[in-house]
Image (cartoon, rainbow, N blue to C red):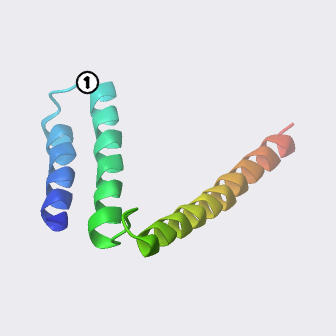
Amino acid sequence: MGFVLSVILTLIPFVMVMEGDFSKVTTLWSIVVFALVQIWVHLKYFLHLNFVTEDGRASTISFLFSALIIFMVVGLSIWIIYESNAMMMY
């Protein structure tokens, strides 16, 4: 089920981009929405993260905490590099 959903969620935006029938804004937002849904599908069907059992709840909270730390490290590193570059240009 997870594999089929992943393929469908990949093919729909791919076809939208290849056909070019939609505006750029519509295409961009649909890609973002399908990507978020696909992230949820991967977390549920491939990583088996859920809130039903106590182990699943602990695994999900651990995963979300790890994702937050990674997001902060990467995001703040990019921000620091950008600001350092901006300060050196003046």
Image quadrant assignment for residue 30? top left
Side of 75 where 19 appears, left or right? left
Residue at image location 16% in from the left, 45% down from the top:
12
Residue at image location 33% in from the left, 35% down from the top:
28
In the foreground, 41 or 75? 41
Q: How many neighbours does mark 1 have within 10 angstroms: few (below 14), some (14-19), or many (20 or more)?
A: few
Up the image or down, 19 lies above or below 60; here it is above
* Residue 71 percent coordinates (x, y): 60, 57
Image quadrant assignment for residue 54? bottom left
Side of 64 where 21 appears, left or right? left
User: How many labels sit on residues?
Assistant: 1
Quadrant where the C terminus sits is: top right
In the foreground, 12 or 1? 1
Q: Residue furthest bottom?
A: 55
Image quadrant assignment for residue 5? bottom left
* Residue 49 percent coordinates (x, y): 38, 67
Quadrant where the N terminus sits is: bottom left
Looking at the picture, which amino acid does disc 1 mark? Ser
* Residue 67 percent coordinates (x, y): 55, 62
- Residue on which disc 1 sits: 23
Residue at image location 51% in from the left, 67% down from the top:
63
In the foreground, 69 or 13? 69
Which secondary structure, mark 1?
loop
* Residue 19 percent coordinates (x, y): 12, 36
Residue at image location 78% in from the left, 44% down from the top:
83
Side of 77 where 90 appears, left or right? right
Up the image or down, 49 lies above or below 22; here it is below
